[in-house]
């Protein structure tokens, strides 16, 4: 199976959402209470974030949602959400890095950033990523 990653044009987001809804629900879970599906959809439909899909000729197997974030001194390409069928990330990992870097550079970004599980550290090093910080969380009951 040959998988590709593709940016969904802004005007097509509404027609793609039904095909990625289950992945949006996974992203909601991984946000640990910071966002729900409706929030993510609002980010997409207002143009604040971009929707990318992992697909073959017939099916969509996951999504990546990104944001071009303007900090006071630099603009960064931020991968905010990522969810897909198990073991499909490895099939598009190289392509995802190439596409993300090209998109980030084309949009004047200084680099790429994202938060991920600790296990990603090893695989991301081959693409030049360094672990620069660790996120600590404490939720109140």
Image (cartoon, rainbow, N blue to C red):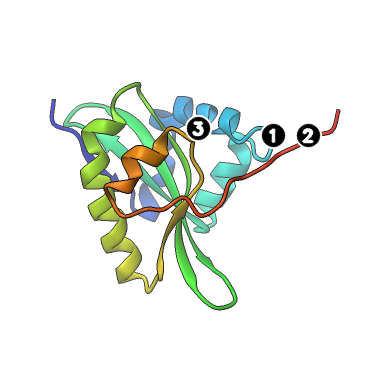
Q: Secondary structure at mark 2?
A: loop
- Residue under pointer 2: 139
- Residue under pointer 3: 24
Q: Secondary structure at mark 1?
A: loop
- Residue under pointer 1: 33
Mark 2 and 1 residues: CB-CB less than 8 Å, in contact?
yes
> Does 101 appear above or below 116?
below
Spatial distance from mark 1 to mark 3, Cα to Cα? 13 Å
Q: Nearer the viewer, residue 119 or 106?
A: 119
Q: Nearer the viewer, residue 123 or 63?
A: 123
Q: How many marks?
A: 3
Task: Determine which quarter of the picture holds residue 102.
Answer: bottom left
- Bin the neighbour count of mark 1 within 10 Å (Cα to Cα): few under 14, some 14-19, many 20 and up: few
Earlier residue among tags 2 and 1: 1
Whether residue 99 is visible to the viewer of this picture, yes or no, is yes
Identify the residue at horizontal 84%, vertical 33% (top origin): 140
Q: Secondary structure at mark 3?
A: helix
């Amino acid at each position: 199976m040959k998988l590709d990653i593709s940016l969904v044009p802004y005007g097509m987001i509404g027609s793609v959402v039904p095909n990625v809804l289950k992945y949006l629900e996974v992203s909601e879970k991984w946000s640990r209470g910071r966002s729900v599906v409706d929030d993510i959809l609002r980010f997409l439909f207002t143009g604040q974030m971009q929707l990318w899909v992992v697909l073959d000729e017939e099916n969509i197997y996951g999504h990546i949602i990104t944001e071009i974030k303007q900090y006071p001194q630099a603009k960064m390409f931020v991968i905010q959400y990522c969810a897909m069928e198990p073991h499909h990330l490895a099939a598009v990992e190289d392509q995802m890095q190439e596409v993300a870097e090209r998109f980030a550079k084309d949009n004047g970004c200084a680099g790429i950033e994202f938060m991920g599980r600790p296990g990603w550290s090893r695989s991301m090093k081959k693409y030049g990523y360094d672990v620069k910080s660790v996120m600590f969380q404490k939720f109140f009951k």
